[in-house]
Amino acid sequence: MKARMNARWLFLLIIAVAAAGIGTLGHQLGLWPEALTRVLAATSLQTVPLQTVVDAENPQPIAVPPRRVRAEASVVPVRSVDLSMPIEGTVQEVFVEEGDAVTEGQLLVKLKDSRQRVLVMQAEAALNRARAALALLEAGPSAEEIAELEAMLAAAQAAYDKLAQGQLPGAIAEAEAALAQAQADYRLLTRGADPLEIIEATARLELAQAQLDQARSAYNRVRNRPDVGMLPESVAMQQATAAYNAAKARLDFLQSGAPPEQIASAAAAVRRAQIHLDVLRQMEPLELAEAEALVRQAQAALDKAKAGARPEEIAVAQGDVEIAVAQLQEALVALSETELRAPFDGVVTAVAVENGAQVTPGLPIVQLADLSAWRIETLGLTELDVVGISPGDRVEIAFDALPSLRLKGRVLRIRPVGEISSASPVAGALPQRTLPLAEQIASDIVYRVVIEPETHDSRLLWNMTAVVDFGTRE
């Protein structure tokens, strides 16, 4: 009985292998398409597993000899990237050449940026305006602004009273004269001294000094008398001293000009006189009720200024500042996009642009790689082999260009998505995920395995071919 069962399983195994061979032979002779050959082979192999054949009544597995797993591979940098510009533009300058070593953040390529710089300046100006407006609201009106509003209210009330009394024309004439006088006083303080006036003032001071000396001499002769305060010499001494002080102040004023406080006071007087005249002229053609409305408006403006900005107004101004900040940041980002910088330390391995060239967004123009260490990346490890490989497994690496070089290494990672072998995969490329079912059946599924060598050899170069020996697998 056992002999018959073993013979039956052996017969089924022979049939399965024969079916796979017939499918392959049929494909080679052109009797049916490659896809059908794959289907027949896959179906026959699924009928009887190759690794283990078991008798149902007396389980005795037939062991398949372990096989050695090898895969073609390629030498790749530990890190590499194709760099492109995010915007379209004209190259202003290329700062690197192939083979240059660069550091992280180093400028590689610069586009013309005149338009972006103008946008940054506009955004900065808008931000400054928004911040100034917010500062004015938070600080409230100045003392000078309050004074002007008070002057406007007083002028409006006075003009209303004159209008009610029918005396507005005369009040306008008086206001015009007051403005003219204030302007004259201001000009006198700010126009500077005339040389003749300085000469005259100097002479007056010298005369006052002589008169003071004469009066002091006369006073000294009688100063010990009990009634000295009642004597003419004492009165003459006081008058001479006052005349001297006045002459000296006049000369000092002409030589140094008026103090800033005095000039500011004169300027404020001019503003008040101008406000008074403007309000009177504004009310001249109005009816009494309209003039009263102007008085109320002036009072409301003064009350609002003293109360300060409302919280809602400050919130709006703060929002304007935030918007301006965001616009400035956007402009700065646009400016930074005219520069291509190295994302890490490495070596420039390719430059595909020159000064004056027009670049397209997303099109690689510089290739950068970290050549301080190498990785070995397999190109065609089949799905039947990859299932027996795990990260950390030890491997041996041989190189076609360096027959005497053998390196030990370990499996670093396995790319989880398989690729279609007929797609001619390139090291570092993204896997192709979708193909028609017939093409998938007709092609092998391969997986990329990344190997980290234990040691490094300076003779290795990018894309050198290698063979990775994973050892025997069951």
Image (cartoon, rainbow, N blue to C red):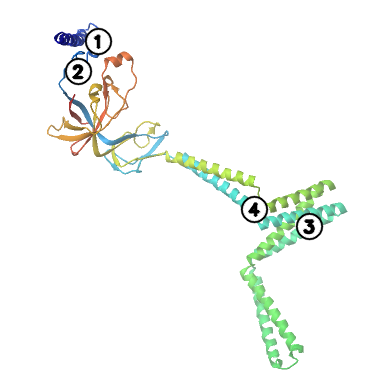
**First in sequence: mark 2 vs mark 1:** 1
Among numbered discs 3 and 2, the one appearing first in the sequence: 2
Secondary structure at badge 1 equals helix
Mark 1 and mark 4: span between their CA atoms?
Answer: 90 Å
- Tag 3: residue type? Ala
Residue at 65% across, 49% down: 309
| Element on which disc 2 rests | loop
Q: CA distance from mark 3 to mark 2?
A: 119 Å
Q: Find out whether the residues at labels 3 and 2 contact each other: C-beta distance under 8 Å.
A: no
Residue 33, quarter of the rendered image: top left
How many numbered discs, if any? 4
Disc 4 packing (10 Å; few <14; some 14–19; many ≥20): some
Badge 2 amino acid: Thr
The residue lying toward the viewer, choosing from 367 and 286, is 367
Q: CA distance from mark 2 to mark 1?
A: 20 Å
Query: What residue is pinned by disc 4?
Result: 140
Q: Quadrant of the C terminus?
A: top left
Residue 311 lies, with reference to residue 429, above or below; the image says: below
Circles 2 and 1 in contact, beta carbons < 8 Å: no
- Secondary structure beneath dot 3 equals helix
Point out which mark residue 175 bears.
3
Q: Mark 1 is on which residue type?
A: Leu
Q: Nearer the viewer, mark 2 or mark 1?
A: 2
Question: If you read the primary sequence from the N terminus, does the residue marked by circle 1 or circle 3 appear first?
Answer: 1
- The residue identified by callout 1 is 40
Q: Amino acid at mark 4?
A: Gly
Q: CA distance from mark 2 to mark 4?
A: 92 Å
* SS assignment at label 4: loop
Which label belongs to residue 312? none
Circle 2 is placed at which residue position? Answer: 52
The CA distance from mark 1 to mark 3 is: 115 Å
Q: Residues within 10 Å of mark 2 (few under 14, many from 20)?
A: few
